Amino acid sequence: MDISNYLYLSVILFTIGALGVLIRRNAIVIFMCIELMLNASNLALVTFSRSNGNLDGQVASFFTMVVAACEVVVGLAIIVTIYRSRRSASVDDASLLKN
Amino acid sequence: MVYLIALPLLSAALLLVLGRIADKWGHLLATFISATTFAIGVAEFFSMHGQSGGNRAVTQKVFEWIAVGNLKVDASLLLDQLSICFVLLITGVGTLIHIYSIAYMEHDKDRRRFFAYLNLFIAAMLLLVLGDSYLNLYVGWEGVGLASYLLIGFWNQNPAYAVAAKKAFIANRVGDVGLSIAIMISFAQFGTVSFVGVKAGAAHASPVALSAIGAMLLLAAAGKSAQFPLQSWLGDAMAGPTPVSALIHAATMVTAGVYLITRSNFIFDASSTARILVVTVGVITLLFGAIVGTAKDDIKKALAASTMSQIGYMILATGLGPVGYAFAIMHLLTHGFFKAGMFLGAGSVMHGMEDEVNMRKYGGLARLMPITAVTFGLGYLAILGVPPFAGFYSKDKIIETAFNQGGGKGILLGGAALIGAGITAFYMTRVVVLTFSGARRWKDGAHPHESSILMWAPMVVLAIGSVASGFLLSFGSSLVNWLQPVVNASNAVGGKELMKPLVVSLLALVVVILGAGYAITKYRTVPDVAPEKVSLFTKAARKDLYQDDLNDALLVKPGKALTLGLVATDNYVIDGAVRLVGWVLSEISDVLRKIQNGYVRTYALIMLAGIFIGALIIWVVTA
């Protein structure tokens, strides 16, 4: 199987994630899109690892997963707290620091 | 000698610093100090009189003032035959006017301040005549300018008076620039500014430099002495209290220009160009002032125009060569008596008439104010040059010396001086007729009365001076001989006599009688309001021969236009550039601000776009 197909998939996934971040307003969805972008890059890393014949890429993808897990913990906590106090998960509503 | 200056200066400072505490006795202290300086002056005069001609001048070094490189100026004083004349005039007339002012200013709540300024004036004027260098003189010169400004604007709650004070100060300033330039030229040429040093240097200096110094000194004299073309301030200076007009703007300060030229006789003797300028200014002013005097209804302004004209005579005399100086000083001294006396008389009339100055509202005051009328009348006879009153001796000598200049110049100068004497007779007779004789024209509310003894006593003393001073000063040529070592060291004699002195005197007398007679017939009846239908000549004279309009058109309007132009340049060009920079920045910020809308995804989009563009550039460059 041609290795470039994995890369195409990775690009498509990353683009979907990026578009989601740019377009959606719900914090949870944006959060999921960020996860999508991270995993797209993981896929690319693993693909390159395979094509290069060493494990560097796979190691890097583990690091990414660890960081992503931590980020989920902190990020979800913030989102839940904001939702509790403001009854909304829209990123546009969280504008207390503006003005 | 230094006490002459220090005492009035200290007294002035004391009265100004103490303020209201000194209100009760301030005028007494100032008068006492003034009398003390007069006593010192008299003592100095007698000790000087005891010496022989060559040893009479005394110098006294007070302290080393400036010592920078080549410029060494000591604050030192010079009392010689010339300055003692001025010291006696300033302190003598000054003391009389202090006494007069005690009564005249009695109801003014600022009388103490008035006396402080008077003492300041006495100190500055004495410094002016006692300084032994041009720089010392300059300090006094500025000091009297300041005192004059303060006193003209003494009632500065009246805006017109404040403007008059400012006008006098600015016109004087033009002259002061002339004096400072003269000082600079003489330092550049001779390396010194002392009278002795400049005199030594003038003996072998270039004619151009001497003419330049002479012209600048003349400019200075014109400013201070209200000579053409800087004379316009003197009429307005009458805004000051009348004693001030008598002391500063008749007897002493305005004659400082004559002193300056006489003191610089070595410059003017060496430069015929400068002398021609001096006589031109003198003749123009003596006619100018006389003509203006014929049309003034304000008694003080008529007297001011007369002062201008009489100082024109003095300036004319100083331009007539070494013999003229002594006559200039003689006329200055006699004028000091009779003009100060007449001003005090005018003040007395105003005092009785509730500060009315319009002569058309007077009339027939002689019976109600006999002492004022008599003292004023004696001053009047003196200024006309009727023998044997003071003006006869001094003015006829000037006319005579002018005629003796020889040739067309002599006839021109002498003729002009003679005509001036005739016009003087006309306008002075007009003043006397309008004020003291004829029908009563004052309103029912006025109660003219003779003034108190404090006011009429000084007038009587000055009237005696108006009668006797001319004879005393010219008896046996006493003043001429007294001043000869200072002003006529070469002992020059006058030119060939054009006419016998007796003929000149008779001519002058005829002209005076004509002028006076014309005035008497013309002013037999006087309308209350100045007639509108008058000759163009009278209209011009009423407007000071358009000198104010000329100044306005030539100097004030262009000056204002320049100022307004500079203001506009500042507002629109300089401020405009600054505002433009600010405006451009704020417009740019307005556009850029829209990017920062607070939406995270906008920032993310920009970031993404940046990354794409960056990646694209890298791809293009590496490919």
Image (cartoon, grey):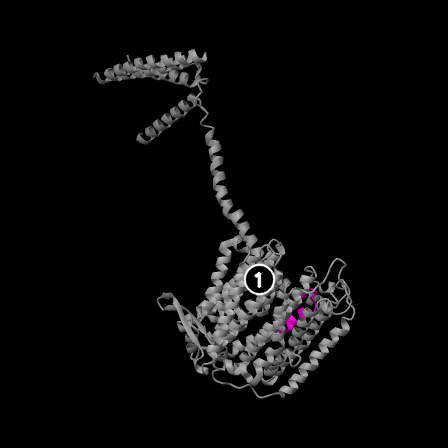
Question: What is the quadrant of residue B379 in the picture?
Answer: bottom right
Q: Chain of mark 1?
A: B
Q: Which residue is mark 1?
A: B168
Image spot of residue B321 (x, y percent): 53, 81
| The C terminus of chain B lies in quadrant | top left
Question: What is the quadrant of residue B97 in the picture?
Answer: bottom right
Most extreme residue toward the left is A54
Q: Is residue B307 magenta?
A: no
Foreground of the two, B212 or B465: B465
Horizontal placement of B339 versus B195: left or right?
right
| The N terminus of chain B lies in quadrant | bottom left
Foreground of the two, A33 or B230: B230
Foreground of the two, B589 or B75: B75
Q: Main secondary structure of the magenta part?
A: helix
Horizontal placement of B11 versus B462: left or right?
left
Q: Residue at x 55, y 50 (%)?
A: B568
Residue bounds of the magenta highlight = B286-299
In the rendered image of this protein, does residue B304 appear above or below residue B165? below
In the rendered image of this protein, does residue B115 appear above or below residue B198? above
Horizontal placement of B358 versus B41: left or right?
right
Kind of residue sitting beneath label 1: Ala
Neighbor class of circle 1 (other Cα within 10 Å; few <14, some 14-19, many 20+) is many
Q: Is residue B169 visible?
A: no
Q: Is residue B359 visible?
A: yes
Image spot of residue A10 (x, y percent): 33, 15
Image spot of residue B478 (x, y percent): 54, 83
Foreground of the two, B567 or B91: B91
Horizontal placement of B191 versus B227: left or right?
left
Q: Residue at x 48, y 80 (%)?
A: B49
